[in-house]
Image (cartoon, rainbow, N blue to C red):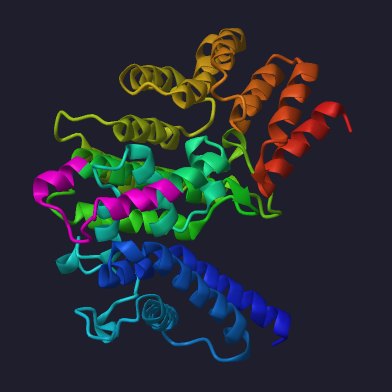
């Protein structure tokens, strides 16, 4: 095997570890040494992963790569703490590496004892504002970069970086406990925890940057965290089941989103025979559980919308009228300018592009989405449907300049080329 292939393989392994184990290892270190050393814990884990990138291509990859990363990070943590405080930190700790599981399988008897989930609830501390909670959790535990978080929250990278620094400091100030809070507090924090899982899944299902249309690791990690909640009485709530249903409905359609040549395929052109019927049935199972109680969240509405897409045998047979009604209900109960933008697609199908364009102008006037690529892509789509090529081209060109995902850029570039007649 050539050195370049080995390096490529190592990069993939470390990238997988970063996405799946980074947050867990940071959580273990913070639980062991205290929240005041959160920044140091992040640094040593990143350094351990960099060390793996440098050494593994020339050696055999360890049988337990995550354990290797933990040991390297833990040793570095001890060295740094000795230097900083001149205290004799030892290996005496309730955490035993030999007994630690770095496998992806979840033991139902240990639900909510997962260190990552503990720290997720700790990051969602009520004395931090909700935005701080979300940014902290996505950065520290989910391994998302500032750029990815900014895309998730529709904020500038500078604003996210500043909020992240403040959120870490605030977490130390409130002396957050990295044990599970009492049941009443746990329930209060659950809504933010679900939001973090939802944003993590979205970034996996539709990466904001890079060269993938699907980041499987992030999607699986979101499902894993949500499964931990579902397996615990305190977390097995209607909204948790609704979120699980939503994720399964989305993943069921993931295989048809890209051609064999590596090009994005729109919903209208997808081969629906490739949709995973078993996943769709699993989605219905969780959706049925979600509606057993008269509690309806945004995840309920989104899951039903997604289920209607899954039920349609063709794009034309989609129940656009019902989907439009669901978006209307969501905007009424959970106001969101992004939901208003997403609503324009079914609105155009039901009432025509002119009506949808009038609504788009209202959204544009708010200025809130002026730097959001999807605003211009929807605008381009509406103009294209109206056969207004010049206006569609202008909108698509504005949108493509705001895209960071290379596959989406290529997809829109092909639209531009087609409309230009080249």
Q: Quadrant of the N terminus?
A: bottom right
The residue sitting at 82% across, 34% down in the picture is 417
| Residue 30 screen position, x and y as percent | 31, 67
Tell whether position 182 is magenta.
yes
In the shown orientation, is residue 242 left or right of residue 368?
Answer: left
Give the magenta part as a residue range.
Answer: 165-188
Compared to residue 75, the image places residue 327 above or below, namely above
Compared to residue 179, the image places residue 97 above or below, namely below
Q: Nearer the viewer, residue 74 or 420?
A: 74
**Which quadrant of the figure has residue 38?**
bottom left
| Residue 256 screen position, x and y as percent | 56, 47
The residue sitting at 69% across, 17% down in the picture is 383
Q: Seen from this angle, which residue lies furthest bottom? A: 59
In the shown orientation, is residue 285 left or right of residue 343?
Answer: left
Compared to residue 88, the image places residue 235 above or below, namely above
**Which quadrant of the figure has residue 393?**
top right
| Residue 29 screen position, x and y as percent | 33, 71
The residue sitting at 33% across, 48% down in the picture is 170
Q: Nearer the viewer, residue 77 or 383?
A: 77
| Residue 92 screen position, x and y as percent | 22, 85
Residue 200 shows in this picture: no
Q: Quadrant of the C terminus?
A: top right
What predominant SS class does the magenta segment belong to? Answer: helix
Tell whether position 100 is magenta.
no
The residue sitting at 41% across, 35% down in the picture is 306
């Amino acid at each position: 095997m050539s050195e370049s292939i080995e390096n490529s393989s190592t990069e993939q392994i470390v990238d997988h570890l970063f996405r799946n184990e980074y947050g867990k290892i940071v959580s273990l270190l913070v639980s062991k040494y205290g929240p005041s050393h959160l920044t140091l814990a992040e640094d040593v884990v990143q350094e351990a992963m960099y060390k793996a990138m440098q050494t593994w291509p020339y050696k055999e990859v360890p049988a337990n790569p995550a354990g290797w990363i933990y040991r390297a990070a833990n040793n570095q943590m001890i060295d740094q703490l000795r230097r900083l405080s001149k205290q004799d930190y030892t290996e005496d700790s309730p955490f035993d590496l030999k007994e630690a599981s770095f496998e992806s399988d979840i033991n139902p008897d240990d639900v909510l004892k997962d260190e990552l989930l503990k720290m997720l609830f700790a990051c969602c501390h009520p004395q931090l504002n909700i935005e701080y909670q979300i940014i902290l959790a996505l950065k520290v535990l989910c391994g998302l970069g500032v750029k990815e978080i900014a895309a998730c929250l529709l904020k500038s990278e500078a604003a996210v970086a500043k909020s992240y620094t403040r959120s870490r400091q605030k977490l130390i100030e409130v002396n957050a406990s990295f044990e599970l809070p009492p049941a009443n507090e746990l329930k209060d924090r659950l809504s933010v925890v679900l939001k973090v899982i939802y944003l993590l899944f979205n970034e996996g299902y539709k990466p904001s940057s890079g060269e993938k249309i699907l980041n499987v690791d992030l999607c699986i990690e979101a499902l894993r965290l949500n499964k931990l909640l579902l397996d615990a009485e305190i977390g097995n709530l209607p909204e948790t089941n609704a979120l699980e249903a939503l994720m399964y409905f989305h993943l069921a359609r993931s295989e048809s989103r890209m051609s064999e040549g590596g090009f994005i395929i729109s919903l209208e052109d997808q081969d629906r025979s490739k949709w995973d019927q078993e996943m769709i049935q699993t989605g219905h199972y969780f959706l049925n559980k979600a509606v057993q109680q008269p509690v309806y969240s945004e995840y309920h509405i989104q899951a039903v919308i997604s289920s209607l897409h899954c039920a349609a045998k063709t794009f034309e047979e989609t129940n656009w009228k019902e989907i439009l009604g669901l978006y209307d209900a969501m905007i009424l109960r959970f106001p969101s300018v992004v939901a208003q933008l997403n609503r324009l697609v079914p609105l155009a199908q039901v009432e025509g592009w002119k009506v949808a364009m009038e609504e788009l102008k209202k959204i544009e006037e708010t200025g809130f989405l002026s730097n959001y690529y999807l605003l211009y892509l929807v605008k381009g789509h509406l103009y294209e449907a109206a056969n207004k090529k010049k206006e569609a081209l202008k909108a698509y060109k504005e949108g493509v300049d705001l895209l960071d995902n290379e596959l989406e850029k290529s997809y829109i570039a092909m639209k531009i080329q087609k409309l230009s007649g080249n």
